[in-house]
Image (spheres, rainbow, N blue to C red):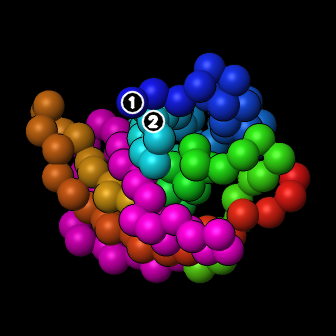
Amino acid sequence: MSLAPAAEQRIRASFSAQGMMHTLGAELTVLEPGHAVIEAPLRAQTAQQHGAGHAGLAFSIGDSAAGYAALTGLPEDREVMTSEMKIHLLAPALGTHLTADGRVVKAGRRLIVVSASVYAWNAGERRQVALLLGTMVPVAP
């Protein structure tokens, strides 16, 4: 199933307006109902002192992927804000880039429970490095 063209255009415009995603070099690569994927390169500027991708990078793209997954189910007069988000760091983020696979777990009228799995890609293989679980709140723009 795919999004209506107007909804996809609105959500992609929202993503393009995010300064943090530009700073991280992130791209919104998949957008479907209840699902969004964001990719970001692993660069020296987003690494921690041991050379692995910083947890802040994993959190940022995971939170945004989950948020855009939630936004796919809302009418055009609504946006989402993160109410809370928990991250489990599972392994060092080593490789060329990260992907965050955001999904809606359960959508309610006032709260949307979301998750995101973050993967590091190295030599064509992926390894899960983080799992996020949180709540989004629909808001007026």
How many numbered markers are drawn? 2
In front: label 1 or label 2: 1
In front: 93, or 138? 138
Q: In the drawing, does residue 45 fall left or right of residue 133?
A: right
Question: Would you name the residue on which mark 1 appears?
Answer: 1
Q: Secondary structure at mark 1?
A: loop
Q: Residues within 10 Å of mark 1 (few under 14, many from 20)?
A: few
Q: Is residue 76 magenta?
A: no
**Magenta region's main secondary structure?**
strand
Spatial CA span between label 1 and label 2: 7 Å
Q: Secondary structure at mark 2?
A: strand
Q: Is residue 90 magenta?
A: yes
Q: Furthest-right residue in view?
A: 141
What amino acid is labelled 1 in the image? Met
Q: Position of residue 56 (x, y in %)?
A: 51, 64
- Which residue is depicted at the point 21% across and 57% down? 128
Question: Would you name the residue on which mark 2 appears?
Answer: 32
Give the extent of the magenta segment.
Answer: 85-114
What amino acid is labelled 2 in the image? Glu
- Which residue is depicted at the point 73% across and 38% down? 14
Confirm whether residue 49 shows in the render: no
Q: In the drawing, does residue 66 fall left or right of residue 74?
A: left
In front: 75, or 55? 75
